Image: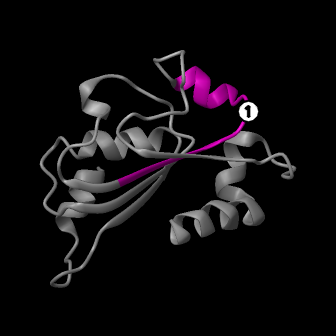
Amino acid sequence: MLREMIASHRFAPGAKLQVIAHSHGGNVALAASHLGLTHEIDCLITLNKPQMDAEIYQPCENIRDFYNISTEGWDWIQYGGSDTRGNYKFDPYAINKLIDTSSSKLKKHAALVWDDQIRNMWWQWFLNK
């Protein structure tokens, strides 16, 4: 569906495509890069993406920049969705960043998206990188 949505969008000349995806949505975006995207993804940001080792979940050459942001500490959802039980927050193809979400009242897996203070924290890191 992501591939089809990108294919049906009318991009202005020189327009960039930036994708922010949470949880398994990050793996969906990576898989879409293998399915013949009609427009390059200039920047992919994944938030608490479960690490998957299959080749379909590795970025294709049509993803220019790839950032993988996860919460510090244990995240049962991210861990449970990963097929790698080692460093399940680290993607070897991305620039990886861990964010401290201990100040949030939300569960770790949701805090990167739904807590304004936490979201601003990783967003500022990204903008200043």
* Viewer-nearest residue: 86 or 81: 86
Seen in the picture, residue 29 relative to 51 is either above or below; the reply is below
Task: Judge whether residue 71 is colored magenta.
Answer: yes
Give the number of callouts.
Answer: 1
* Left or right placement of residue 30 versus residue 103 in this view: left
Seen in the picture, residue 78 relative to 1 is either above or below; the reply is above
Q: How far across and down, in percent of the image, does residue 81 sit? A: 53, 25
Which residue extends farthest front?
129
Q: On the image, numbered disc 1 is attached to which residue?
A: 73
* Left or right placement of residue 74 versus residue 58 in this view: right
**Within-10-Å neighbours for mark 1: few <14, some 14–19, many 20+:** few
Which residue is at a point 46% across and 29% down the rendered structure image?
51
Which residue is at a point 25% across and 45% down the rendered structure image?
32
Q: How far across and down, in percent of the image, does residue 68 sit? A: 48, 46
* Left or right placement of residue 62 versus residue 52 in this view: left
* Viewer-nearest residue: 38 or 117: 117
Q: How far across and down, in percent of the image, does residue 79 sit? A: 60, 24
User: Tag 1's secondary structure?
Assistant: loop
Q: How far across and down, in percent of the image, does residue 30 sit? A: 31, 42
Name the quadrant containing residue 10.
bottom left
Which residue is at a point 53% across and 64% down the rendered structure image?
126
* Viewer-nearest residue: 35 or 73: 73
* Viewer-nearest residue: 66 or 111: 66
Which residue extends farthest bottom?
12
Q: How is the image coloured?
A: one colour
Magenta-colored span: 66-81
* Left or right placement of residue 20 versus residue 101 in this view: left
Task: Judge whether residue 9 is colored magenta.
Answer: no
Three-letter code, disc 1: Gly
